[in-house]
């Protein structure tokens, strides 16, 4: 009897939080779904009418839609490749007893605390500027012509900025996994004659597999929504060269004042993101059960 009363009391106490969470999620999602079936231009609200599937067809048949999907996947894969590979190398370095290890760890972690718009401004005006940026000065020092990164390599520039921001996260997760590896196991392999490469391939990397999977899962969910870096640096251009799906929705819904089209694009983005999340969650589940 006491157990049943305790469970009832616990449900009553949790209920307000659950209701607030549902309202927080359901109302915006419901409004988005409703607007996605409406002809609604924010500049002409009196002309609102039911559109059926026209908004979805408009977004789906937009030539920029498939390019934005391609750019979104390119950003995700590019950032993951950089953060996982360099993050693993940094984790191996930070796991060694080096001088100034605490300072090095702080420097490695610090980019993660920089807000995306600030990071984008920093890279745009101080690092990648073709006139006075750091890369331009290095190019002149080597006798080379400075590169206008955001004009010639816009998508690669976005990948670099986002990877710089997410590298500390990957490094911390991978370093934590690396430090949980038994020293006796590494010493035993070393005594058996295994060099560093063999120890890394057969001992360290399998041990870090779960951590790498977690990094890929969490980063992918966030990288599907990259927006601020594109807005501040390239504006999605030149043309649609650096426009990903979230920025395309911004162009349709905000710049073109097409609330219905933007809502339809948002619904499509949510569906695609959930499909990716489901596959990733299954992959993580298999990895953790292994």
Image (cartoon, rainbow, N blue to C red):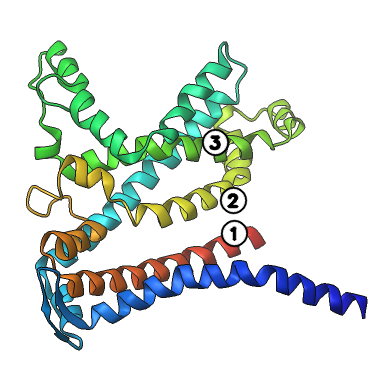
**In x, y percent, where is residue 102?**
58, 18
Q: What label does residue 172 carry, if any?
A: 3
Q: Quadrant of residue 51?
A: bottom left
The alpha-carbon separation of the residues under discs 3 and 2 comes to 14 Å
Q: Work out how far the residue at label 3 is from the one at label 1, CA to CA, in angstroms.
A: 20 Å
Q: Is residue 84 above or below residue 96?
A: below
Is residue 237 among the parts visible in the rendering? Answer: yes
Res. 259 image quadrant: bottom left
Q: Determine whether label 1 and label 2 are within 8 Å by CB.
A: yes
Nearer mark to the viewer, of 3 and 2? 3
Rendered residue at 46%/34% (across/down):
168
Q: Quadrant of residue 245?
A: bottom left
Instruction: Give yes or no for contact between labels 3 and 1 (Cβ–Cβ under 8 Å).
Output: no
Please name the residue shown 18% across and 65% down the image: 253
Q: Earlier in the sequence, mark 3 or mark 1?
A: 3
Q: Is residue 256 rendered to the left or right of residue 113?
A: left
* Marks 1 and 2, the one that precedes in the sequence: 2
Residue 257 drawn above or below residue 264:
above
Q: Any mark on residue 210, and which?
A: 2
Residue bearing mark 1: 287
Quarter placement of the C terminus: bottom right
Position in image of residue 104 (x %, y %)? 51, 19
Residue at x 45%, y 28% (from the top left corner): 110
User: Callout 1: few (<14), some (14-19), or many (20+) C-alpha neighbours within 10 Å?
Assistant: some
């Amino acid at each position: 009897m006491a157990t049943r009363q305790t469970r009832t009391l616990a449900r009553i106490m949790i209920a307000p939080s659950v209701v607030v969470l549902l309202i927080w999620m359901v109302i915006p999602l419901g409004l988005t779904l409703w607007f996605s079936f409406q002809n609604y231009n924010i500049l002409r609200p009196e002309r609102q009418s039911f559109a059926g599937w026209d908004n979805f067809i408009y977004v789906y048949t937009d030539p920029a839609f498939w390019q934005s999907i391609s750019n979104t996947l390119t950003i995700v894969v590019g950032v993951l490749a950089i953060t996982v590979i360099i993050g693993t190398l940094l984790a191996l370095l930070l796991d060694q007893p080096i001088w100034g290890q605490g300072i090095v760890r702080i420097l490695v972690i610090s980019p993660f605390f920089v807000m995306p718009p600030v990071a984008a401004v920093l890279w745009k005006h101080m690092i990648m500027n073709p006139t006075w940026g750091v890369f331009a000065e290095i190019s002149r020092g080597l006798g080379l012509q400075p590169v206008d990164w955001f004009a010639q390599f816009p998508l690669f520039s976005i990948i670099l900025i986002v990877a710089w921001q997410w590298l500390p996260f990957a490094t911390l997760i991978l370093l934590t996994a690396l430090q949980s590896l038994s020293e006796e196991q590494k010493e035993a392999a070393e005594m058996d004659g295994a060099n560093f490469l063999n120890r890394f391939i057969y001992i360290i990397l399998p041990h870090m597999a779960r951590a790498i999977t977690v990094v890929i899962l969490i980063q992918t969910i966030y990288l599907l929504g990259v927006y601020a870096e594109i807005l501040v640096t390239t504006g999605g251009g030149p043309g649609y060269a650096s426009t990903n799906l979230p920025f395309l929705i911004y162009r349709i819904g905000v710049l073109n004042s097409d609330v219905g089209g933007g809502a339809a694009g948002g619904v499509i983005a949510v569906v695609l993101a959930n499909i990716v999340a489901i596959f990733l969650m299954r992959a993580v589940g298999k990895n953790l059960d292994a």
